[in-house]
Amino acid sequence: GTFLVRSGVLSSVHAFASDPGRGLFILALLALAAGGALVLYAWRAPALLAAGGGFAPHSRETYLLLNSALMTAATLAVLLGTLYPLVLDAFAAQQISVGPPYFELSMLVLLLPALLAAGLATFTRWGRDRTGRVLRAVGAPAAGCVVLGAALPWLLFGRWSFGAAAGTALALWVLAGAASGPLRQWRSGARWGMAVAHLGVAAFILGLSYVNSFGVSRDVRLAPDEAVEVAGHAFTLRGVDEVLGPNYQARRAVIAVAGPRGRQFTLAPEKRSYFSQESPLTEAAIDITPLRDLYVSLGAPLEDGAWSARVQFKPFVRWLWAGAVLMALGAAVAALRRRRP
């Protein structure tokens, strides 16, 4: 992604400077990082057979290998969807676009079994295990994850969604696997890195499921002193002021928001006009809590002092970023932990 965007092959919605001259440097840097990892894998591969003499088809190693293969396939699916329009345009002079349906379906097909394998691997022994023992070990946790997964979205949002229920059950399944294991491994710190990383995976799944299932985006008309309700919040336009910034002038709306449980606050989105360019830009106002983000973007002025606006309600969206941080932290803990003999 870095190479494709910064070299100018692809355009991005983010404000990256396009510099084709940097493409070769970035490509060499990525080749060094990826090539170093592949060399390390090739160097350490003989140690796997030398240490354990291989592993049976039904073992923790098998599920870890399956998980890695599925994650690699997901990466290739994203790369294919990104590059296929460019290749088709270059060799067949046909222009197409690959949209969200392709990426959503490919990720669902590949990551669903990967998450199931991630939870199942923690219940399975190294080297070899018996199917009957594993089924007995996962029976109660799996049933609990399904029941809680079906109930939790209703308790949090007052309505039910199959996607949210399935995502919650998967997140709980990953957590259940991370919490399993002998007590001595927890005391020695052998499972802390894995547990933190799996906690991050669970947080990411919850955030993704709830944003897609319960997120709201509406274009509304905000008239002075008239309340408009979106996602359980009442928005009232109190006025629009002219403001002058260091390199722009703007019209700033003052919007009073009444949220659930009596919480009240004010949002101030802006429509900015920078001196260096003609087209106006929108500066969204955001209210952040651990369980949701609320965005208001100012549109165009309407008659009678009203304004158009876009209101977005994104539940658990911060959990996506928190999950990524926890996954990286878990990897660091696992890498830095001093192994005991």
Image (spheres, rainbow, N blue to C red):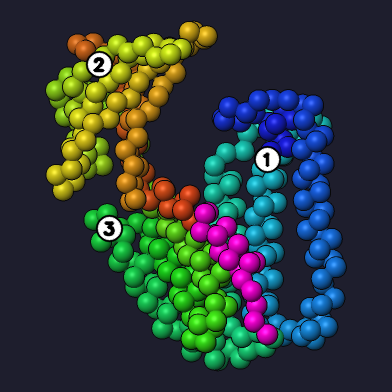
Asked whether residue 214 is in view, the answer is: no
Which residue position holds label 2?
A: 240
Give x and y (percent) for residue 276: 52, 9
Give the amino acid at mark 2: Val
Q: Quadrant of residue 288?
A: top left
- The residue lying at 25 percent from left, 16 percent from top is 240
Which residue position holds label 3?
A: 156
Task: Estimate how packed mark 3 is, as few (under 14), some (14 to 19) or many (20 or more) residues with alpha carbons within 10 Å.
Answer: few
Tag 3 secondary structure: helix
Give x and y (percent) for residue 158: 24, 56
Asked if residue 327 lies in the magenta stretch, the reply is: yes
Q: Earlier in the sequence, mark 2 or mark 1?
A: 1
Q: Which segment is the magenta one?
A: 324-341
Q: Are marks 1 and 3 in contact (CB under 8 Å)?
A: no
- The residue lying at 70 percent from left, 45 percent from top is 80
- The residue lying at 52 percent from left, 54 percent from top is 325
Q: Marks 1 and 3, Cα distance to the nearest angstrom? A: 36 Å
Circle nearer the viewer, 3 or 2: 2
Q: Is residue 251 above or below residue 29?
A: above
Which residue position holds label 1?
A: 1
Give the amino acid at mark 1: Gly
